[in-house]
Amino acid sequence: MNIVFNSHHLVFLLQGAGWTLVLSLIAFIGGGLVGFIVALCRISPSRSLRWLSMVYVQLVQGTPLLILMFLAYFGLSIVGLTLPALVAAGISMTIYVSAYVGEIWRGCIQAVPRTQWEAAECLALSRVQRMGLVVLPQALRIATPPTVGFMVQIVKNTSLASVVGFVELARAGQVVNNSLFEPFLVYMLVAGLYFLLCFPLSWWSRQLERRLLVGHRVEVAAA
Amino acid sequence: MSVILLDNVHKSFGTLKVLDGVTFSVNKGEVFAIIGRSGSGKSTALRCIDRLERVDQGRIRVCGHEVSDPQLDLRQLRRDVGIVFQSYNLFPHLTAAENIALAPRHSKGKTRKEAGEITARVLAQVGLSDKAQSYPEQLSGGQQQRVAIARSLAMEPQVMLFDEVTSALDPQLTGEVLKVMADLAAGGMTMVLVTHEMAFARNVAHTTLFMHTGRVWEQGGPDMFERPQTAELQQFLSAGL
Amino acid sequence: MTYKFDFTSVLAQWPLFVHGAWLTVKLSLAATLLGLLIGTLCAVGRGSRNPVVARSCAIYVEAIRNTPLLVQIFLVYFGLASIGLKVPAFVAAVLAMVINVGAYTTEIMRAGIESVHKSQIEAAECLALSRAQIYWHVILRPAMERVYPALTSQFVLLMLATSITSQISAEELTAIANRVQSDTFRSFETYAVVAVFYLLLSLLMRGAFWAAGQALFTRRRKLGTPL
């Protein structure tokens, strides 16, 4: 029986895309919060905090996201929890994002000129005040282009959640393909949907970078 | 016998007229200085000689090449003309010796041994034999500029062009570069130099050209500096001390 | 928690893991070399005066950078099969990875090429060097030295991303991990051990790149400063 691609399939794919966005948001918010802490630890006056956060970043950045997904998935079942695949995917993506975003933001904080730190110190501001009132607001401006650029990586990397059974866009594509046996058509459509999600973010990131001063470019590791 | 000839050259950048009917010629072995205010068109005129800018109107002939001809063999022209820039433009990833040997090896097809001999000779000529293995960042501005001169000399050109080559240097370093240029002049090289160094133009150049608003305003020998004919040159000489 | 961690049964499989790591290295090396070639050609193409060439390279880069590697792998593997070309999984894996890393490398090389100031090219033209000679000696060589750290990071990420090819059953470390964990029923331990292997591979790769950089870029080795 030859099934033809119809609106049901398209809706299924679009639902998958919706879940892609949900997971991306969870990863960004969760990873952003943890990443912020990581960034602060990386520049902490405490040597042990600096060292710990560096080790954390090196470990996470040296492991494939797919392996992290498996570890989270099987790790959760060890602890005795039977939770939906979204939880495992969310946890592994949060960890993954926190390490990369933490490094990006650390770089941005350090890109704020030394003179700003010194000026704030000479105004007798405490460390917290220096960070909160002077450095971080400037770092935020510098951080916006690479962070938006990294959001593209997040959206693309959610595709790996398909491997632990979470039905986001890539998995939806696999399911549709299994009933249609039209891999080229299905995956081109899936690719097209990812493109529609990612390209605006890429474009926006480039616009932001162009508007920012040349001296504040930060290298982003691409994946 | 003129080696360089500019005949009624006009050039504009957009609406800005930079060269307005420039005519002059340079003979073999002549040291030809071009002076003038910023914006007078002197650098543009020099760059047109080596086809770094294209003229809108007029004719330029250099070492037998018709520079204004669109069919010109650019590489052959550039083998006959050497040019030294204000910002030296040395290749930062190569040593002084490698900078110098690059063009003889790849553009003139010299063997490694031949290129090595040429390199040693020109480095000695500019007084930097001991800096052959240094990278540009290890050299002072004056040394870098001398390497740049050596790099152009290594191509054994018929004509050497100098585009304000001491303007970017600290005053203490201009002397060493000017000395190299004076030695070259004494050796009979045909040279055209755009310069702000009035003393050099006066003492070394056979002919000096004063350019103003894109035109040849005055031209003459060293006595032009003592007896300027036009008010503009008078003003320029008294102001630009 | 009643789960008892048992690493011994997993660690007993270490020859398999080493073999898997070796396969990963082979896959990564092939993709790295070919990807660098494609990336450099495309970066040059992006700056081409021919609008068709420049546009095509730009479209290629944007298409790859805005779609996930997993989907690209599926397209290459299943897509080729559906038009009659049955390629072995390893070949499809290399192909997909080369296409993928080629796009990212293009952007990196493009940044390197654009970092070479116009005055350098002008000086080279005035030394009567040909266009090809200028591209190689004056543009690409310093460009590569400048972007070498970014290239290194890119290729280490590539090596980690080869884990995704396990999804089309290409033979590499993650695929072997999948088999081991289904045999031993020690899933967490298996992936933990494999994670360590990947970490070691990343360190090894960075070390190898560093050594290669020292050998290739004499200026950096002698002076220690960035270009």
Image (cartoon, coloured by chain):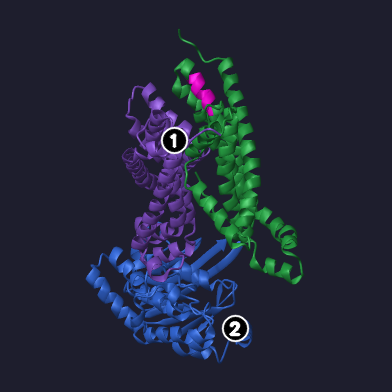
What x and y, as percent, mark residue A75? Answer: 53, 35
Task: Tell me what residue is drawn at x 49 percent, y 59 percent.
Answer: C115
Q: Which residue is mark 1?
A: C164
Colour of chain B as rendered? blue
Q: Which residue is mark 2?
A: B233
- The three-letter amino acid code for the residue at tag 2 is Leu
* Predominant SS along the magenta part: helix
The residue closer to the viewer here, B170 or B137, is: B137
> Helix, strand or loop at disc 2?
helix
Residue A194 relative to residue B123: left or right:
right
> At which x and y percent is residue C174?
41, 36
Q: Nearer the viewer, residue C155 or C185?
A: C185
Q: Is residue C111 magenta?
A: no
Residue type pointed to by label 1 = Ile
Q: Which chain is green?
A: A
| x, y percent for residue C170 | 36, 32
Query: Which quadrant of the view contains residue A115?
Result: bottom right
The chain to which mark 2 is attached is B
Q: What range of the chain is rendered magenta?
A: A170-177
